[in-house]
Image: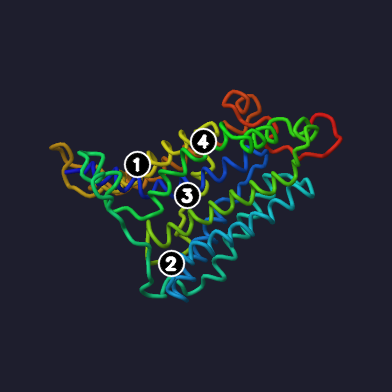
Amino acid sequence: MIDWIAILQAGIASGTVLLFAAIGEIMAERSGVMNLGVEGMMLIGAMTAYRTAVTIDQPWVGLLFAMLAAGILSLLHAVVSIHFQADQVVSGLAINFVGIGLSMVLGEGLSKAGAVSLLPTITVPLLSQIPVLGPILFTNHNPMTYLGYALTPAAWFYIHRTRPGLHLRAVGEHPAAADAMGINVYRLRYGYVFAGGVLAGLAGGTISLAVSPGWFSELTTSGQGWIAIGLVIFAQWNPWRAAAGAYMFGALRRLILDLQGPQTLLGFANPFFYTPRLGFFLQMLPYALVILILFIGSREAMKKRVGAPAALGVPYIRGERGT
């Protein structure tokens, strides 16, 4: 028997990780800078948070250090892609490899570190008693999950209803016009790339200290950074749609695991139980879908159709026409 409440609850918890990373990437790409190094930044964040928690027994400090470490790594991408006008795809991929490599070297031995203090789980009084929604949204979640609830509307409001958000959209759509209006294009792009890195680090730290707690290895992020990048295109750079996609993907991952458990399903022999390869195939499908989304979304005509920022991936050079 499949427990749909448990599946949706787990989807909310694990989807929060994707939500943090996706909203960070939305901020960076809205400013015109594509960052394909999200996976590496998440992994360096997960390693930093876990090592800090192991060393000083302070998971909250671990999260702060995770955000700082990933933010610093994102600044390297900013320098290469904004200051030196390098190809943003190549720079992002290089940063991804740097993040993964550093996390493996600095995180050596952490998989055998033993018990570590983790983020607590919280049940919200009264709200947890709401039928159906209460157990899913407000029961036994870590504090980062509740932060995710607030982050989504806050990010949407910031982008669409504030003057700094207007400047962000202007820099990503028409940087030359924004520069002519006195907006510092370079400073804003640096700031939002850093913000994206900080949120990627928070996502990684949340994995190691809350969602999949108590361990760290090269499999900690399991490609979720790439899923977050695909979610940005799927969401058309809208935080609300990114949240919906993140939670759906989280629930789907849990559903795939649960489908492989029972010997019978709806009164019939469960093919996923008796043929494990089918389960592996199901687990592969979401990642294959992300590759397809990235391939389709990279085409110039499709970028315009899905509403990508006009200057996304285009280095801004002051005084040059067409920027």
- Residue 290 position in % (x across, y down): 49, 39
Q: Which mark is residue 252?
A: 1
Please name the residue shown 57% across and 26% down the image.
306
Q: Nearest the camera: 87 or 120?
A: 120
Can you name the residue that lies furthest to the right here? 319
Q: Which mark is residue 59?
A: 2
Residue type beneath disc 2: Pro
Q: Residues within 10 Å of mark 1 (few under 14, many from 20)?
A: many
Residue type beneath disc 4: Trp
Residue indicated by mark 4: 156
Residue indicated by mark 3: 224
- Tag 3, which secondary structure? helix
Q: How is the image coloured?
A: rainbow
Q: Residues within 10 Å of mark 4 (few under 14, many from 20)?
A: some
- Residue 265 position in % (x across, y down): 18, 40
Left or right of residue 301: residue 132: left
User: Would you say the residues marked 4 and 3 are in contact, meaning their CB atoms lie under 8 Å apart?
Assistant: no
Residue type beneath disc 3: Gln
Question: Mark 3 or mark 2, which has the lower sequence index?
Answer: 2
Q: CA distance from mark 4 to mark 3?
A: 22 Å
Q: CA distance from mark 3 to mark 2?
A: 22 Å
Q: CA distance from mark 2 to mark 1?
A: 28 Å
Please name the residue shown 64% across and 48% down the image.
193
Question: Mark 3 or mark 1, which has the lower sequence index?
Answer: 3
- In terms of image quadrants, where is residue 206? bottom left
